[in-house]
Image (spheres, rainbow, N blue to C red):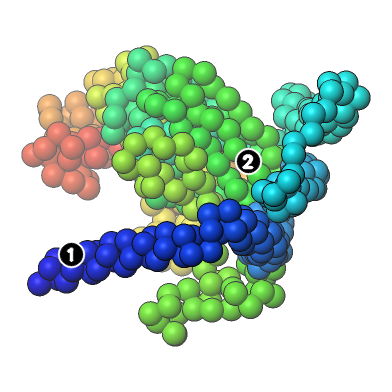
């Protein structure tokens, strides 16, 4: 039924148009062809002038009306140090092109009105005028030169790389269909090397070389993890792509750079407004004082839900929209707290797995040493302040021995060195070093092995300056298991060295 009604309407419109054309033709015959053409030209010329006025007024009015939703105006002034220069360059360009735009349209429609057909009018022949050509060539050339030079000055000011003696934060953004992998350096402040041949989707998404120790503490934000940056800090972003052309676009910071496969690019900027400060600026505008969810009047205001964003500004495929990421700018103190809560991708996902290179198996890396130091310090401090005797036993989790012997593995030195430091700090502690084994083998041999291991730990600490009278070494063999000896994991847990607070 709907299709039938639509067809009837179309047919009626065609009939009406044909009748209008017929009436127009008859009116021409009545008035005369020449008079009818003159009136038609006058009417068209007049309407062109009316259209010009309405068009230009609407252009200016709409620009003014929507200025608060355009970058660079109203609440959307740049949130980065260099952004003001880019906005200034756009404003200068808009000033000159706006003049040309308005004058061109005025002349275009005015000439259509002034030189409309009139009986008796004849065309005028103008000889070649070099001066006129110089004017309409020279003036645009001068203006364009001014704009280009200003643009180069701004470009050279905001795009130089950072010298190594300056303090900055370097992160890396790797685009792929359809997400961003954002990588932060760890405590060493350095990003590790990559090799595209090492990419394993889901395991090593950006091809980090795990034999490069700079990669050990690198932090990887994947999926929808929020990107966090400190305010008033120079940030250098390495920008790469794993597959097709993407674009790293931070509109509120005036940062936009292509991510090109095989050709790393970069951008440097300094955020000057935290997310909260930007939200507070939006709060002063009526259009941001509306519910974020129009269907829920009780929802937060739009300004409260505002977030900076990272977008891909290239049409990189049907999932292009999903590359949007939320970015939050915080104070330096808040950033330090956030960073401290992030974990190394290698240590939490690769270490000790089949993907961990063989050369790393017997190494102990700086972040691991630091973490173990913190753990032992916390255990000792808890024991020192504890009142219950059950809390007075600490397992030395990172003291190891060569298989079947009492010889200390070289990886144990970090735990024992730090233990000696803590024993010096707490000089009134007297401790027992308790050795334990699993149940495999002869009971007597296990007892002797545990005693020898405890003796070697005691000797190591004495050599580090701890008074021997404060240290008692005792082997317990297999008689105090903490796990089942029926499994390999359980036996591993039972082979241990403990620190017991004697007094």
- Which quarter of the rendered picture does the N terminus lie within? bottom left
Q: Which residue is drawn at the image coordinates 45% and 21% (left, top)?
A: 261
**How far is the residue under mark 2 from the one under mark 1?**
52 Å
Height in image: 274 above or below 315? Answer: below
Q: Which mark is residue 28?
A: none
- The outermost residue toward the bottom is 298
Count all numbered tags in the image, as a single digit: 2
* N-term-proximal mark, 2 vs 1: 1
Rendered view: 253 above or below 443: below
Residue 501 shows in this picture: yes
Under circle 2, the secondary element is strand
User: Is residue 272 or residue 331 the one in the foreground?
Assistant: 272
The front one of 364 and 248 is: 248
The residue sitting at 60% across, 58% down in the picture is 35
Q: Position of residue 243 (x, y in %)?
A: 37, 25
- The residue that label 1 is drawn on is 7
Circle 2 is placed at which residue position?
255
The quadrant in which residue 354 appears is top left
- From the viewer's perspective, is 105 left or right of 196? right
Residue displayed at 20% across by 30% down: 446
Circle 2/circle 1 CB separation < 8 Å: no
Q: Is residue 230 visible?
A: no
Badge 2 crowding class, 10 Å Cα cut-off, few under 14, some 14 to 19, many 20 or more, is some
* Residue situated in front as seen by the camera: 361 or 145: 145
Q: Residue, x 58% and y 53% (percent of image)? A: 34
Please name which of the two marks, 2 or 1, marks the residue nearer to the observer: 1
Q: Secondary structure at mark 1?
A: helix
């Amino acid at each position: 039924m709907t299709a039938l009604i639509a067809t009837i309407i179309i047919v009626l419109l065609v009939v009406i148009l044909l009748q209008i054309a017929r009436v127009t033709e008859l009116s021409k015959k009545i008035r005369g062809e020449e008079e009818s053409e003159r009136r038609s030209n006058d009417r068209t010329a007049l309407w062109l002038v009316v259209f010009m006025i309405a068009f230009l007024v609407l252009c200016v009015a709409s620009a003014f009306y929507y200025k608060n939703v355009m970058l660079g105006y109203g609440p959307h002034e740049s949130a980065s140090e260099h952004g003001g220069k880019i906005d200034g360059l756009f404003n200068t360009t808009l000033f000159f092109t706006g003049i040309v735009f308005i004058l061109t349209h005025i002349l275009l429609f005015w000439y259509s009105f002034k030189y409309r057909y009139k009986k008796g009018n004849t065309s005028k022949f103008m000889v070649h005028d070099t001066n006129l050509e110089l004017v309409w060539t020279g003036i645009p050339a001068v203006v364009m030169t001014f704009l280009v030079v200003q643009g180069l000055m701004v470009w050279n000011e905001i795009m130089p790389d950072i010298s190594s003696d300056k303090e900055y934060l370097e992160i890396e953004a790797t685009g792929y269909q359809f997400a961003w992998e954002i990588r932060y350096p760890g405590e060493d402040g350095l990003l590790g090397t990559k090799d595209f041949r090492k990419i394993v989707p889901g395991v090593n998404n950006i091809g980090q070389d795990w034999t490069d120790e700079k990669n050990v503490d690198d932090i990887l934000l994947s999926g929808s993890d929020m990107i966090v940056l400190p305010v008033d800090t120079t940030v250098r972003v390495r920008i790469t792509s794993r597959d097709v052309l993407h674009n790293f676009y931070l509109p509120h910071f005036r940062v936009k750079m292509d991510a090109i496969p095989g050709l790393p690019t970069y951008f440097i900027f300094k955020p000057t407004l935290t997310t909260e400060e930007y939200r507070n600026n939006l709060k002063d505008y009526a259009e941001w004082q509306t519910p974020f969810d129009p269907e829920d009047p009780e929802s937060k205001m739009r300004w409260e839900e505002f977030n900076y964003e990272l977008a891909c500004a290239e049409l990189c495929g049907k999932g292009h929209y999903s590359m949007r990421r939320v970015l939050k700018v915080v104070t330096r103190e808040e950033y330090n707290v956030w960073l401290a809560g992030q974990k190394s991708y290698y240590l939490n996902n690769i270490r000790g797995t089949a993907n961990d290179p063989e050369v790393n198996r017997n190494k102990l890396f700086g972040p691991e040493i630091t973490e173990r130091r913190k753990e032992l310090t916390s255990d000792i401090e808890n024991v020192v302040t504890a009142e219950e005797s059950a809390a007075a036993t600490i397992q030395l989790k990172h003291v190891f021995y060569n298989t079947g012997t009492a010889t200390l593995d070289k990886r144990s030195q970090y735990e024992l060195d730090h233990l000696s430091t803590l024993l010096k700090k707490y000089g009134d502690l007297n401790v027992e070093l308790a050795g334990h084994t699993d149940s495999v083998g002869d009971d007597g041999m296990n007892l002797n092995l545990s005693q020898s291991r405890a003796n070697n730990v005691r000797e190591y600490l004495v050599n580090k300056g701890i008074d021997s009278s404060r240290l008692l070494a005792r082997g317990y063999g297999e008689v105090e298991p903490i796990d089942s000896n029926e499994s390999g994991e359980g036996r591993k847990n039972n082979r241990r060295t403990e620190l017991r607070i004697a007094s």
